[in-house]
Image: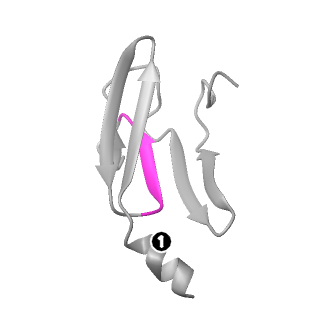
Amino acid sequence: SCLTNAMKKLRYTVTIIHKGKQWARSLEKLPFIIGRGPTADVDIPTDVISREQIRVTRDELGFWIEDLGSSNGTFINNK
């Protein structure tokens, strides 16, 4: 669909804040993986997240965040 093609051309900015530290990355692809490992699209250099913590996708309804089996879980806005 036209909407799907338009979504593929967007630039996304990911901002992660944890205990006063902030990381921001800009991406042009979906889905993407956030983690601390070399296979993550957004590499966050901290031991509080897994090598592959979450996958971010998007569809016509909005963004979706999937925990990839991390041992500490995933929280958005402390929830």
* Residue 15, above or below 72: below
Between 78 and 70, the one lying in front of the other is: 78
**Residue 12 magenta:** no
Residue at left 32%, top 36%? 24
Residue at left 60%, top 23%? 72
Whole-percent x, y for residue 58 in the image: 57, 62
In the rendered image, the quadrant that contains the C terminus is: top right
Left or right of 36 on screen, residue 58: right
Label 1: how many Cα within 10 Å (few below 14, some 14–19, many 20+): some
Whole-percent x, y for residue 75 in the image: 63, 28
Residue 62: image quadrant is: bottom right
Residue at left 42%, top 73%? 8
Look at label 1 and name its amino acid: Met
* Residue 43, above or below 7: above
Left or right of 11 on screen, residue 72: right
In the rendered image, the quadrant that contains the N terminus is: bottom right
Scheme of image coloration = one colour
Left or right of 34 on screen, residue 58: right
Residue 28: image quadrant is: bottom left
In this figure, which residue is indicated by the disc labeled 1?
Answer: 7
Between 46 and 5, the one lying in front of the other is: 5
Secondary structure, mark 1, is helix
The answer, for residue 39, to whether it is visible in the render is no
Q: Give the magenta part as a residue range.
A: 30-36
The answer, for residue 60, to whether it is visible in the render is yes
Between 33 and 12, the one lying in front of the other is: 12
Whole-percent x, y for residue 63 in the image: 60, 55
Q: Residue furthest top?
A: 19
* Residue 5, above or below 64: below
Q: Residue furthest bottom?
A: 1
